[in-house]
Image (tube, helix red, strand yellow):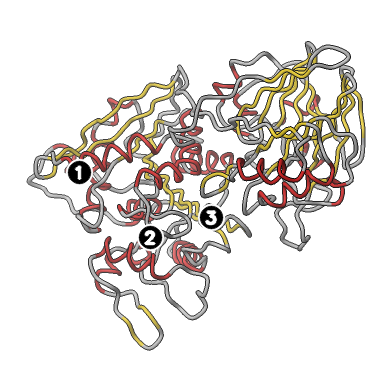
Amino acid sequence: MTNKLFHSYFQITILFLLTVPAAIAQRSKPDTIKTVNENIVIQPVFHASMRLQFGKVNILIDPYNSISTFKQMEPPALILITDIHQDHMDTVLLNTLNFEKVKFIVPQAVAEKLPAKYKNDIVVLQNNEQIKEHGISITAVPMYDLPQTPDTRHPKGRGNSYLLEYGGKRIYISGDTDDIPEMRALKNIDIAFVCMNQPFTMTVQQAASAVLAFKPKIIYPYHYRNMNGFSDTEEFKKIVSQSNSHLDVRIRNWYEKPNMAANIKKNENVVYGMVSGASLTMDIYKPEHSNKIGIITIPGTAYGYAYRPDYEQASTTQNFAQDSLYFGKYARQLVEKGYTIFVINHRLAPDFRYTDIVGDCQRAVRFIRFNAHKFDIDPDNIGAFGYSSGATLCSMLGVKEQDNDSKQTGPETVSSKVQCVVTLAARFDLSDFNKKEDTAIQNPIISRVLFNYVGELPMVDNTGYTLSGKYAEASPLTYVNKGDASFLIYSSYDDPLVPHRQETAMYNKLVSNGVDAKLKLSTKGGHFPVPDLEEIDKWLMQHLKKNY
């Protein structure tokens, strides 16, 4: 194996399943705030999640992400949820865990989506309403986007920020909000948790301006993971401190690198093929209680060349870590739901072209299928789940069969196609870019990435680039036919890299050929559409589980 090939494989394998870059420290220790009653203990958990302890009363705010983390915590008396999105109302986590003797304080929109098993434990609190539980006053404060539009991500009245009062202390939890008048009008706030992540909530500058207006004594920046990294919390602290040195900005880590759950077994560097003496490897994540469904996962790597989200060339290590912020957590949660996950490594462009890379992925399917009995999965029903370039490769696995060689034995004797595909921000037509309407599309970057992958630029006619030659061969759209894998497609209208017409074209061609498909287009999200894990789970079970 060459060092270069091994190094590339190692980066993908190790970094893919991180939810955060490895450089980030472990979870912050709890902070203790003295009150006239018993103390308040603040424990950051993840992103928008935290545990607050008021004396002996434990409260969870927006429990999200690692199921194993919450299993280790003391049972809560109250769970407050701010809004319906996955990073606040984690339905996978709530369905998996059984919170007993707990009361959910939620807005109506959340109440309508909570798992049915909690229906008798819900208290609905709408904007500006107030209740008292366990000696803690809880007021629902509005949270919403500015400006309000018909397709706004956070409409006014749907979600809640919360104001908690206990022992003479007033604590504000912003949830997903913009710099709104209701926040600026807050008075006598002792502790504030303030969000700052683009493109969904405030910028660092907006968040700083807001807290300087309502002057909380202690400020915790939280919910600061963007779709392309992290907001600059140090810059936030600098802006606030320079304007008002009396405000105490406390930067804590809300993005601990997760530990693999004890009940998940990991088998690293399983060899699924050999190329010129170099090994093709995969990592396998197997749950304690398997549903016998195997899912191949392929992260986004730009086929080998990686770029920062600001479209400047960056190291693959940085880019994979950023992809992992987005994609890795979803794959890990599928393991926790009972799926066996195969994280495959393929050869990388520009040293290798699309025929090699797609061939590696097909070889992985055959290896998994041939050895299904060893992995305790159904060989006849295998799925694929990918992001960006990985989603394009997964799509090829659903529509293109690798030729069988009757003279071969072993994995070459079984099919290389999967039966169900879930894609996030996939490019289905590789030549579809640089059109007149794509003024926001980053064409120079796309053309470089695709050139490295395909080996030549696409053909040009009077209307722009055309799907032809090698670009046709490398595009999933080319191969769609009756009997292909089912597709669940996630995309965003504002994706700066893939025009959403691609997803629409793929969906239409699938349906016209009698293939079961569903298209989910979100208004915002950019190149990081926000999938619904419950929907993905249901789709996979429907198409891959016998007698579902």
**Residue ID for mark 3:** 518
Q: Give the vertical position of 163 relative to 362 (above or below).
A: above
Label 3 vs 1, first from the N-terminus = 1
Q: Quadrant of residue 252?
A: top right
Instruction: Give me the C-alpha separation between circle 3 and circle 2.
Output: 16 Å
Query: Residue at the location (24% across, 40% down)?
Result: 7
Say which element carries label 2. loop
Q: How many discs mark residues in the rendered view?
A: 3
Q: Looking at this view, is 210 or 131 the one in front?
A: 210
Please give the label number shown on residue 482.
2
Q: Which of marks 1 and 2 is in front?
A: 1
Instruction: Give me the C-alpha separation between circle 3 and circle 1.
Output: 37 Å
Image coordinates for residue 406, horizontal then vertical, percent = 11, 48
Image coordinates for residue 305, horizontal then vertical, percent = 32, 55
Identify residue type, mark 1.
Leu
Identify residue type, mark 3.
Lys
Query: Residue at the location (47% across, 66% down)?
Result: 502
Q: Nearer the viewer, mark 3 or mark 1?
A: 1
Query: Residue at the location (51% across, 29% down)?
Result: 337
Q: In which quarter of the image is residue 127?
A: top right
Describe residue 167's horizontal placement relative to residue 412 as left or right: right
- Residue 546 appears in the picture as rendered: no
Image coordinates for residue 301, horizontal then vertical, percent = 36, 50
Q: Give the vertical position of 540 relative to 92 (above or below).
A: below
Can you say which quadrant of the picture contains the N terminus? Answer: top left
Label 3 vs 2, first from the N-terminus = 2
Identify residue type, mark 2.
Lys
Describe residue 199's horizontal placement relative to residue 416 as left or right: right
